[in-house]
């Protein structure tokens, strides 16, 4: 319909243009013809009846030529319009074919998507209905055990490849009247566990009269974790199924209890993997820290030995310094005594020198000068000699 309308419009445009052109040319020819007729009539008037017949023939011939030219022009115009419309009409037909094909494909795709969507909705509704029927047939204890079995099967399915050296078993030891559900532990060849997790699994049927909250079980889980010496505590729960906080992913409850998390069952394996990989990376840090501590201990011991030596040396230096000062004092005393002795000796030397000088001055004459008895004896002695 659009192509036909376009063709009609194009034809109308061409016809209008042709008609305008034709009218223009006809007007020019008519003017020319009018002039020719007037000339012919004038000539006929002049030539009277002899030439009138020839002019009539000429007029008829001109009319015939004009009609033939008009018909030829109309035919050429029609052919030109047809030549222009044919490729355009072909393109329009091709586009219309593509539009029709695309419309059919769109309808088929919409129908296919609608069928798939309806099928998925039906499958989902059927699955929900089956789960509701299944839950309605289970007791609360059976629901909890079903979640535990689910988690245990999930772990055992990848134990050999992902956790070959890990311990994941039921917690059967009651301490203080309480126990958890499962304990996960893993250690390396160099020492004790590098990660340990206490798990508690909580499930609930849609028809359970008393609805529990996740917060109701955190205190007991923290107590079980502390009783078994575990580093982390994780509550795997389907409680509060309409709570977006728990439905979005892993919920950190460490602000309530240390290293406490609440997760949905689908995050059970990812949570273990996340904590375990982080703990494995910390092993190297712990080793390096231990080595650093050992080095610090060695440095501390060296410093202690050095300080002990310095203290001992200072003590001995103080003692030696005291003895040295005493010795200096004794030496000073000895020097003073020697100096005193030297002074005394010098004084004695003076006295001896004076005494010697005086001794050198002693003669018999001086000795007997005022001693008549001795003088007589010496005189007698000298005479005897």
Image (tube, grey):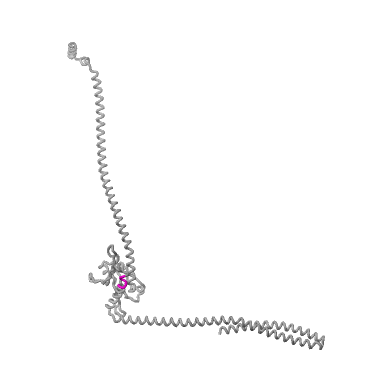
Going by the image, does 15 lie left or right of 187? right
Q: Is residue 199 visible?
A: yes
Q: Is residue 196 visible?
A: no
Please tell me in which quadrant of the rendered image residue 61 appears.
Answer: bottom right
Given residues 349 and 235, the one toward you in this image is: 235
Instruction: Report the quarter where the C terminus lies.
Output: top left
Residue 344 lies in the magenta stretch: no
Question: What is the chief secondary structure element of the magenta stretch?
Answer: helix
Q: Is residue 193 above or below residue 358?
A: below
Given residues 43 and 174, the one toward you in this image is: 43
Question: x, y percentage for residue 43?
Answer: 80, 85
Please tell me in which quadrant of the rendered image residue 327 appears.
Answer: top left
Residue 157 lies in the magenta stretch: yes
Residue at image point 24% right, 34% down: 334
Q: Residue farthest to the front?
A: 160
Residue at image point 44% right, 82% down: 112
Q: Is residue 66 above or below residue 293?
A: below
Question: x, y percentage for residue 375?
Answer: 19, 13
Question: x, y percentage for residue 271?
Answer: 33, 70
Residue at image point 42% right, 82% down: 115
Image mark count:
0
Q: Which residues are magenta?
A: 156-160
Q: Residue farthest to the top?
A: 383
Please tell me in which quadrant of the rendered image residue 155 appears.
Answer: bottom left
Question: x, y percentage for residue 1?
Answer: 56, 85
């Amino acid at each position: 319909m659009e192509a036909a309308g376009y063709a009609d419009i194009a034809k109308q445009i061409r016809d209008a243009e042709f008609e305008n052109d034709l009218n223009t040319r006809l007007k020019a020819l008519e003017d020319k013809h009018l002039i020719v007729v007037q000339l012919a009539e004038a000539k006929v008037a002049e030539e009277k009846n002899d030439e009138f017949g020839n002019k009539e023939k000429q007029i008829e011939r001109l009319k015939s030529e004009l009609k033939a030219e008009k018909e030829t022009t109309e035919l050429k115009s029609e052919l030109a319009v047809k030549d222009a419309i044919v490729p355009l009409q072909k393109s329009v037909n091709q586009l219309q074919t593509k539009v029709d094909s695309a419309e059919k494909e769109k309808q088929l795709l919409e129908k296919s998507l609608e069928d798939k969507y309806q099928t998925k909705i039906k499958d989902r509704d059927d699955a929900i209905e089956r789960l509701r029927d299944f839950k309605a047939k289970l007791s609360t204890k059976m629901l909890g055990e079903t979640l535990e079995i689910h988690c245990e099967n999930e772990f055992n399915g990848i134990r050999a490849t992902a956790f070959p050296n890990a311990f994941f078993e039921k917690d059967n030891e009651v301490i203080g009247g309480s126990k958890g559900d499962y304990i996960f532990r893993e250690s390396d060849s160099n020492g004790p566990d590098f990660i340990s997790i206490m798990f508690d699994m909580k499930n609930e049927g849609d028809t359970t009269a008393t609805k529990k909250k996740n917060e109701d079980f955190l205190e007991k889980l923290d107590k079980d974790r502390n009783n078994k010496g575990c580093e982390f505590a994780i509550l795997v729960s389907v409680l509060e199924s309409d709570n977006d906080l728990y439905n979005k992913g892993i919920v950190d409850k460490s602000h309530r209890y240390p290293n406490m998390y609440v997760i949905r069952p689908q995050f059970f394996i990812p949570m273990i993997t996340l904590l375990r990989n982080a703990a494995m990376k910390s092993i190297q840090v712990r080793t390096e820290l231990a080595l650093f501590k050992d080095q610090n201990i060695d440095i501390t011991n060296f410093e202690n030995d050095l300080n002990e030596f310095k203290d001992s040396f200072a003590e001995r230096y103080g003692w030696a310094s005291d003895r040295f000062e005493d010795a200096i004092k004794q030496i000073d005393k000895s020097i003073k005594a020697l100096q005193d002795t030297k002074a005394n000796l010098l004084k004695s030397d003076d006295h001896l020198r004076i005494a010697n000088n005086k001794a050198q001055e002693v003669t018999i004459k001086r000795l007997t000068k005022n001693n008549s008895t001795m003088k007589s004896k010496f005189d007698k002695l000298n005479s005897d000699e």
